[in-house]
Image (spheres, rainbow, N blue to C red):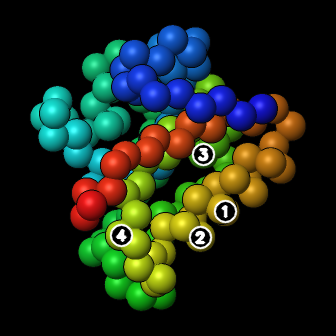
Amino acid sequence: MFSFRTTALEDQLDKALLSGRVGCFCTQNCWDTARGRYMYDLFSERGTLKTVFSPKGAELTPGTNHISFEREALTGLDAVVVEIQDAGARYFNYSKDVFQLMEALAAMGIPPALYIVDHINPAG
């Protein structure tokens, strides 16, 4: 199933986002300038954040620095929220990581809901 929404993440009424166990799949760029917080802070404030999947080093180094995760870390989650600002470069590492996440979810019997957060391109 696919659902497209244009309201802010904190205004979504999905049970998985409001009271479920949430994992956030994001880079260090998931800062919300309008609210002065990281995307995962929303779920931390609600008490529903269970894990954050993020890279451990500098971003945008070709062929290195990916968001690594163990498939077992997805077990028990009700939702996975992906927020990755694309740099618009052909060597953008995280596209592959999101596909690996989708493959892992597809292999699960009952996977958590997957939410992709999109933004206006900051470069115009």
Name the mark nearer the viewer: 1 or 3.
1
For image coordinates 59% across by 70% down, the residue present is 96
Q: Which residue is mark 2?
A: 96
Tell me the CA gap for discs 3 and 4. 27 Å
Tell me the CA gap for discs 1 and 3. 14 Å
Q: Which mark is residue 100?
A: 1
**Contact flag, marks 1 and 3 (Cβ < 8 Å):** no
Image quarter of the N terminus: top right
Q: Which mark is residue 73?
A: 3
Label 1 amino acid?
Gln
Disc 4 residue crowd, few under 14, some 14–19, many 20+, Cα 10 Å: some
In percent of width and height, residue 100 lies at: 66, 62
Question: In the rendered view, would you say 108 is above or below 47?
Answer: below
| Secondary element at tag 3 | helix
| Secondary element at tag 1 | helix
Tell me: 80 left or right of 122.
Answer: right
Tell me the CA gap for discs 2 and 4. 14 Å
Disc 1 residue crowd, few under 14, some 14–19, many 20+, Cα 10 Å: some
| Secondary element at tag 4 | loop
**Contact flag, marks 2 and 1 (Cβ < 8 Å):** yes
Tell me the CA gap for discs 3 and 2. 18 Å
**As rendered, which of 68 and 86 lies closer to the eye?**
86
Image quarter of the C terminus: bottom left
**Contact flag, marks 1 and 4 (Cβ < 8 Å):** no
Disc 2 residue crowd, few under 14, some 14–19, many 20+, Cα 10 Å: few
Name the mark nearer the viewer: 3 or 2.
2
**Contact flag, marks 2 and 4 (Cβ < 8 Å):** no
Q: Which residue is mark 4?
A: 87
**Contact flag, marks 3 and 4 (Cβ < 8 Å):** no
Choose top left, top right, bottom left or bottom right for residue 98: bottom right
Give the mark nearest the N terminus, 2 or 4: 4
